[in-house]
Image (cartoon, helix red, strand yellow):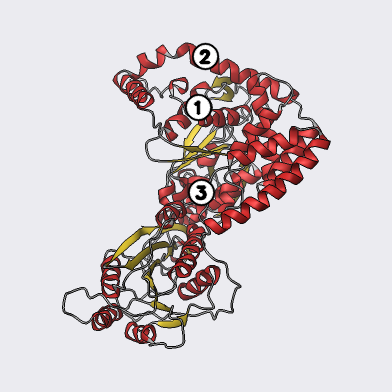
Amino acid sequence: MHHATFPFSAIVEQTQLKTALLLCAVDPSLGGVLIRGDKGTAKSTAARALTDILPLIERIAGCAFNCAPGVPYQHCETCNTEHATAQASSVPFVTLPLGATEDRVIGTLDLEQALKGAQRVFKPGLLAAAHRGILYIDEVNLLPDHLVDVLLDAAAMGVNAVQREGLSVSHPARFTLIGTMNLEEGDLRPQLLDRFGLMVEVTAPRDKVLRSEVVRRRIAFEANPTAYAATWMQEQQELRYRLATAQQLLPEVTLDDALLDLISHLCCEFEVASLRADIVMHKAARALAALEGHSQVTPQDVRGAAELVLPHRRRRKPFEQPGLDQEQLDDLMQQALQPPDESESGAEDTEQENAENNGESQDQQQVFASASAGTVRKIEVDAVSNRYASGKRSTATDAPRGRVIRAVPDQNPSSLAVGATLRSAALKGADNFQVTKDDLHQQIRSGKNANLILFVVDASGSMAAQRRMEAVKGAVLSLLTDAYQQRDEVAVISFRGESAQLLLSPTRSVDLAEQSLRELPTGGRTPLPHALSVALETLEKTSMPPLLVLLSDGKANVALNDGNDPWQESLRFAGLLAERGVPALVLDTETGYLRLGRARQLARALGAEYLTLEELTAENLALTIRGCIK
């Protein structure tokens, strides 16, 4: 049966997503699109459907490098023969699997050819297959770091350079990068985010009429894909024509200087550091105009481009949702389009108004205090040698598990890299093929240990709860913003009144953390024993090396079991945590002249590092914690 893809035209709503994909088709140099959104919101359906409406490209059958006709790659045997004739073909759509090895992505020595006696023949990888087409990565935020680095290099240069096993090859690799991701799994590294020209946030429709229409179309498609595709043939044909026309019109589209100033103005106002934003916005605005059939860019095109180019590049403040403030964008557009004399006075009024508004809103909803950064000692926490012995983060290159990232010559390998060993032997000549000790290679795996940072926070009335919570919120966010590199997870337990609750289950997502911590009730009594028992339960369920960060004055006054002494119970749980070798940090929040020093005793029972919180701001708290687990 012919495998049909779901028709692009049949996707319900999702206007912004469809526009972004079409823009990448009009101008492949935009740098691709990142589609962020919940599970099951047609992210990959739309990406795959795009290939069906893209204008065909000319290529020679059997060419592994997708050479452009007339400019063959020098080592391409298919295109450099005399009788090679090009034919129309659909644009390549290559899926990058999450488990792909570096060899599979960039290409490697062709072992089969080497064994036949051919000298160093290059076997192209996925980057060659994606040249002049689309490289699609599902769950791009889960891609291992070493592959991300390879992709960044190729995407930046438009060339894939391979230096390995006696090979020195570089071939063109210009592709449109389309990635999808679900924020629940954690965010992307900023360098990779910036590489995606455009970004779209996708949500499932909340309207029941739309939802039922989505289901109706999907069911009809699955029942008979070919027949369903045929019913959308005319719309698909119109889209193909629109795209082909836009591609031809694009070189003639002009963008005048006033609009270029507007682009730079918007980038500055939204505090976007990367200059790539200005360049991509310029290209996206021209592509939008071409798609609409105009040869002159309008302010509306610039606005449409801003919505796709700026959200993932602007500097986000802690606990701020991703995306663009639409009202701010409207105001900036209006200011820019007013006559000069009006806009100057208008801008002053707005600035004054903004300053006033900021003053008001800061009083009403301050998220966390950034008190002056006190001096903070960098502290190391030594894990007791036990279940969590790896208290320090290690990038152990001899990690027993983890992804294989490369192979190195080693006459006594503990984990043999078969492919590299055979290739090394084959390079010496196929006539007398034998593997000697000199050919042996060791597999090198990446085994970075991530950590679980568990905050246990006293929200009772016995402490200045508000300020402590502000510091914790800030620290959680600071730690999560670089959790992509570290792969760390953060969890928060809050305790007050009669019990403790796991407020934030272990997560790598900044946005989930922000939602959970937004409203934190404070006040009431101090159920410290329950908090420590919840901490113990949470840590039992994780295989990650943990760090426990306890913020409390230690004045427990609610026992877990009636009739028990709350303080003795607290010490007992602290002892249990210490037995399990859980590295811990106690931040004493006790204030005032008469101090009982309970938190210090608790730190002793936990075998933990002890600090007072008075000199710690949110930023410093994050740095201190990083110091513990480096």
The x and y percentages for residue 123 are 51, 42
Disc 2 or disc 3, which is closer to the eye? Answer: 3
Q: In the figure, is residue 275 to the left or right of 624?
A: right
| Residue 526 horizontal/vertical position (percent) | 31, 73
Where disc 2 sits, the SS reads helix
Query: Which amino acid is tagged 3?
Result: Gln
Where is residue 139? Give x, y as percent.
Answer: 43, 44
Instruction: Tell me which residue sits at (45%, 55%) in the image.
Output: 514
Residue 539 against residue 11 in the figure, above or below: below
Residue at left 47%, top 29%? 14
Q: Residues within 10 Å of mark 2 (few under 14, many from 20)?
A: some
Lower position in the chain sequence, tag 2 or tag 1: 1
| Residue, disc 3 | 321
What is the total number of numbered labels drawn onto the structure image? Answer: 3
Q: Is residue 587 something one can see in this rendering? A: yes
Figure check: 492 above or below 188:
below
Give the mark nearest the N terminus, 2 or 3: 2
Question: Which amino acid, by three-letter code, is at mark 2?
Answer: Gln
Q: Is residue 272 visible?
A: no
Give how far across and how far down residue 330 sits, in percent: 64, 36
Report helix, strand or loop for mark 3.
loop
Q: Residue at x 64, y 39 (%)?
A: 329
Residue that badge 1 annotates: 50
Q: Which residue is mark 2?
A: 237
